[in-house]
Image (spheres, rainbow, N blue to C red):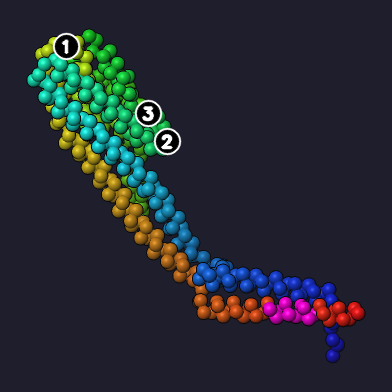
Amino acid sequence: MAMTSIGDLAQTHILRRHTAATKADLDRLTAEVATGKAADHAAHLRGDFTALSAIESTLARLQAYGSVTADLSLRAEAQQRALAHVDEAATGAGAALVTSAYGAIQGTTAAGGQARQALDATLSALNQRLGDRALFAGADSGGAAILGAGAMMDAVQTALAGAQDGPAVLSAVDAWFAAPGGFGAAYLGADAAPPLAIAPGETAALDITATDPALRDTLKALVLGSLLADPGFGTPSARATLAQRAGESLAGLATDRATLAGRLGSTQQRLDEAAARNSAEASALGMARNDLLAVDPYDTATRLQETETRLEMIYALTARLSRLSLLDHL
């Protein structure tokens, strides 16, 4: 029987290929022992990616839901703080105005000054931003939600057209807040942002804007009270009427402001619940994915040891052949 010999160069190439393949096996098995997961998914699953693809697709959707709920939760929390500032400012101004209605002009002037400060604080709260987005501007969150106090008071003073008595002032302010060219123009945002998906089959929306009736009516009462900051505005009787009307309105609107905060709180609760459900489902799917890709730790460790032994044998054989080649040469 004829014998086929292999030249030195061919032997070298064969050993190099075996060394490279064995090193690759060693790296793969080392990674599998460290992670407990198969390095070659296709081989481990025998080419059937159906279950793994379904799990990863669902995990990707849950991750998207998680991003939405986290963003909405941050915005809702910021809105809740802003509404608390509005209520605090309005409550204090309302009490001061009601008290001043039965006193001298100096009292209504001081109360009017407090109302103006509350108006500043309220409009600042409604113009708050989270990152680069306005909180109460609806879908158009790039700019301010509403005019500042100075611009709003200037517009109302223009609408008053010199009116000084109580009924005329009340009528003019009511008309300005009801008109598209009045308060409608002072609002710089857009309609409420549309709902966003937060879980399979579930959406949530932060739909409170600066035009919400509770906020608009609070602003109207604060504007009425702010007119009294000018001691020369109106007769004593008119000033008392305006102070009482503005103060009572602010006090009466406390329930509406609380309802608004409660509505936002309900949305926050839904966001928290959706986030908890999504997190639990993601955890379960993560474990299922790990189970699909898991390798037998004992079997993998045994094969790793065998591969290390094989690599050592290849190194030993390479060294022996190198010495033999040197002897042949000599």
Categorize mark 3 by other alpha carbons within 10 Å: few (<14), some (14-19), many (20+): many
Residue underneath mark 2? 132
Q: Amino acid at mark 3?
A: Ala
**Upstream in the sequence, badge 3 or badge 1?**
3
In this picture, is 262 found above or below 199? above
Q: Secondary structure at mark 3?
A: loop
Q: Position of residue 103 (x, y in %)?
A: 9, 19
Q: Quadrant of residue 114?
A: top left
User: Would you name the residue on which mark 1 appears?
Assistant: 234
Q: Give the residue pinned by disc 3.
A: 144
Identify the residue at the far bottom of this view. 1
Query: At x 24% / y 22%, what residue is drawn?
Result: 116
Quadrant where the C terminus sits is bottom right
Judge depth for marks 3 and 1 and give the one in front. Answer: 1
Q: Is residue 292 visible?
A: yes
User: Residue at horizontal 13%, vertical 11%?
Assistant: 235
Q: Is residue 153 magenta?
A: no
Q: Amino acid at mark 1?
A: Gly
Q: Is residue 298 left or right of residue 180?
A: right
Q: Position of residue 72 (x, y in %)?
A: 35, 44
Label 2 Cα neighbours within 10 Å, binned few <14 / some 14-19 / many ≥20:
few
Give the mark nearer the N terminus: 2 vs 1.
2
Location of residue 84 (image quadrant): top left
Q: Say which amino acid is labelled 2.
A: Asp
